[in-house]
Image (cartoon, helix red, strand yellow):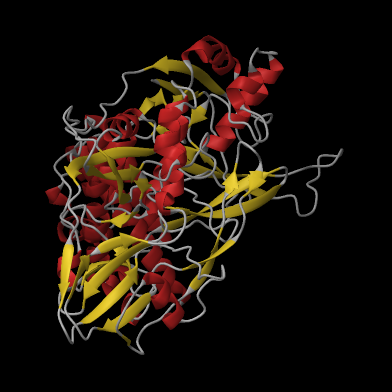
């Protein structure tokens, strides 16, 4: 595994197109920590490759409609995970202020006079890391590339010297290098050698989004809120073809329909099974439910991009979320499927080579598939719940236009209740290798419900599949008895998490200092609020200026007291001594801390005096 290291040799503005408060804002994540967008980094690398006329440019970076070998992630500052752990106590705006400065620039005419409307504000990442003023800020980006192209990418990285906004005006000077690192440990699936070809097995697994993800939906720039089974099948098919040809095994796994790849739906920290909410349950509309008391909503993030002078946005699945799904197949196919998903660099959706789609497998279990039979007694109310979109047709090839028609297609016998509801949607897709849009098909939407009151004893499978494209996550129906809703869900998966064992001491010291300074501000404001009236009558601009000079000139507390005792005016001397006593400055034993605190108090006294003077 390799990382690209980008060390700042000057301040940097790597914008993502999101200009909220400045004419050029640097890209920051939801915690306020700066990063370099992968698309920006990849574009600069390709520009450097063209500049030095490197070989295999198309093979490394790809062309329109053809994926290149290089897959690149956003570049984050070193010790990013540790920073996230420490920074969640503070606002994103405050964290951003630690790493950045805001400057302004203008344009002038030939006579050196500023042009009208040329003032621009630019937010830049500081050259030096906040917790070590002698060390340059460095960003690291995880990449994946064929080993044969590594020497060429190494030369490209070393030739990239500038990145970001105003790179020809003093910003964005960087030192770039390619570094080999140890690959993270993969989750190991317990794969048995004794699976029976006559039995079916189910692989239940969960993945964590390491990057934001864009799953194409009905709206071009808006993501689906789940990962479709077709995306899983396509990813594993591509992984198989890396080391095999499109042989008979490939046909059995991915073309025959004998392997069912379910959709991946959002899950919680315990990896419980969640499904789309029933459309008749209004309070959970648009959410995912696990039982009558649990619901989850999928978090999305708006990502801005620049493209040839214009900007556009995409609504993506937010990174850090966990999705759970399953793959069902016969025992002779399960070892191949399990090995593929265990060894794959998992990624789904659009822009898989830059900025989006990377996932990590965090849990997987293989068990023999045991049909869960449900017993329905007379007068039981049963819900036939569409857990996924279903592409179903009647004998004439038409999509069911009523609940009764859909019930007939599903073979449901019983009295249809008025609370039944069907929703429809258009499903499609895109074949990137052929640059072709898949046909648009009308389907019954996930969350649709057919409620039935049975009049006789019945036994059937709790989960079954109907219609077309069953192997791609479509047509999954779950039967739920009205009084046994909680029993319709499978058990939790076991999760293995890598915890951060220790935090960089410099980072801990920096945030410790921030908390200490916040305490100083709180103490100073408390003193000011309690003594506001006395302050307004005892101080003036000259006295405050002299007090600031005395504090600055003092090398320790004893010298400060000598200088205070040297004040000629007795009233002024008493006012200073009272300020030292009442402001609780004695709690700060270190002179530099005490000095900082006293200067802070004197500044606040100045503001109170000015405010009283204006009133």
Indicate left or right for 199 with 537 as reference: left
| Residue at the extreme bottom | 418
Residue 463 x, y percent position in the rendering: 27, 62
Residue at 56% across / 47% down in the picture?
Answer: 25
Indicate left or right for 278 with 187 as reference: right
Residue 486 x, y percent position in the rendering: 16, 69
Is 347 situated above or below 174?
Answer: below
| Residue at the extreme front | 395
Residue 280: quarter of image: bottom left
Is 45 situated above or below 374?
Answer: above
Residue 527: quarter of image: bottom left
Residue at 38% across / 20% down in the picture?
Answer: 1
Residue 401 x, y percent position in the rendering: 52, 79
Tell me the quarter of the image containing the C terminus: bottom left
Tally the numbered discs.
0
Residue 307 visible, this angle: yes
| Residue at the extreme right | 110
Residue 488 x, y percent position in the rendering: 19, 66
Q: Nearer the viewer, residue 238 or 223?
A: 238
Q: Nearer the viewer, residue 560 or 490?
A: 490
Residue 513 visible, this angle: no
Residue 15: quarter of image: top right
Residue at 52% across / 23% down in the picture?
Answer: 9
Is 56 situated above or below 41?
Answer: above
């Amino acid at each position: 595994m390799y990382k690209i290291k980008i060390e700042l040799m000057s301040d940097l503005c790597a914008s993502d197109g999101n200009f909220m408060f400045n004419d050029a804002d640097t890209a920051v994540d939801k915690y306020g920590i700066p990063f370099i967008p992968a698309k920006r980094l990849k574009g600069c690398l390709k520009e450097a490759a063209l500049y030095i006329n490197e070989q295999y440019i198309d093979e490394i970076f790809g062309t329109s409609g053809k994926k290149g070998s290089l897959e690149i992630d956003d570049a984050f500052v070193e010790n990013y995970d540790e920073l996230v752990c420490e920074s969640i106590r503070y606002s994103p705006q405050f964290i951003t202020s630690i790493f950045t400065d805001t400057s302004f620039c203008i344009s002038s005419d030939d006579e050196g006079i500023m042009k009208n409307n040329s003032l621009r504000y630019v937010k830049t990442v500081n050259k030096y890391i906040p917790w070590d003023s002698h060390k340059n800020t460095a960003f690291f980006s995880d990449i994946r590339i064929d080993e044969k192209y590594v020497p060429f990418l190494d030369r490209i990285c070393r030739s990239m010297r500038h990145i970001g906004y105003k790179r020809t005006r003093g910003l964005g000077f960087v030192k770039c290098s390619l570094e080999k690192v140890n690959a993270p440990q993969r989750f190991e699936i317990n794969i048995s050698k004794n699976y029976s070809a006559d039995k079916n097995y189910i692989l239940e697994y969960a993945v964590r989004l390491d990057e934001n993800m864009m799953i194409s939906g009905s709206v071009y720039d808006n993501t689906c809120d789940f990962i479709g089974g077709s995306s899983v099948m396509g990813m594993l098919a591509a992984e198989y073809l890396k080391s095999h040809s499109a042989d008979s095994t490939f046909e059995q796994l991915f073309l025959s329909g004998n392997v069912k790849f379910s959709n991946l739906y959002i899950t919680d920290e315990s990896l419980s099974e969640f499904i789309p909410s029933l459309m008749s349950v209004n309070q959970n509309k648009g959410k995912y439910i696990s039982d009558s008391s649990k619901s989850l909503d999928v978090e999305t993030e708006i990502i801005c991009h620049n493209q040839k002078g214009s900007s556009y946005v995409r609504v993506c699945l937010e990174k850090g979320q966990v999705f759970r799904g399953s793959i069902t197949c016969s025992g002779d196919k399960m070892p191949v499927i399990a090995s593929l998903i265990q060894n794959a660099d998992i990624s789904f959706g659009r822009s898989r080579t830059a900025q989006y789609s990377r996932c990590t497998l965090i849990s997987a279990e293989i068990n023999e598939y045991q049909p869960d039979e449900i017993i329905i007694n007379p007068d039981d109310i049963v819900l036939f719940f569409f857990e996924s979109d279903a592409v179903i047709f009647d004998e004439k090839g038409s999509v069911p236009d009523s609940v009764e028609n859909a019930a007939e297609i599903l073979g449901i016998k019983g009295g249809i209740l008025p609370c039944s509801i069907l929703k429809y949607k258009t499903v499609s897709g895109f074949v990137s290798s052929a640059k072709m849009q898949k046909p648009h098909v009308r389907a019954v939407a996930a969350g649709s419900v057919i409620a039935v009151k049975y009049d006789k004893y019945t036994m059937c499978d709790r989960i079954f599949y109907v219609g077309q494209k069953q192997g791609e996550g479509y047509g999954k129906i779950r039967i739920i008895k009205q009084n046994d809703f909680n029993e319709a869900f499978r058990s939790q998966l076991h999760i293995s998490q890598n915890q951060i064992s220790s935090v960089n001491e410099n980072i801990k010291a920096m945030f410790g200092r921030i908390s200490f300074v916040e305490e100083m501000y709180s103490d100073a404001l408390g003193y000011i609020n309690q003594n506001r009236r006395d302050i307004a009558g005892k101080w003036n601009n000259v006295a405050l200026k002299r007090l600031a000079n005395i504090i600055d000139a003092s090398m320790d507390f004893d010298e400060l007291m000598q200088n205070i005792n040297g004040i000629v005016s007795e009233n002024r001397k008493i006012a200073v001594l009272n300020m030292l006593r009442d402001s609780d400055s004695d709690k700060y034993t270190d002179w530099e801390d005490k000095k900082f605190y006293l200067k802070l108090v004197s500044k606040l006294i100045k503001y109170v005096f000015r405010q009283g003077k204006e009133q």
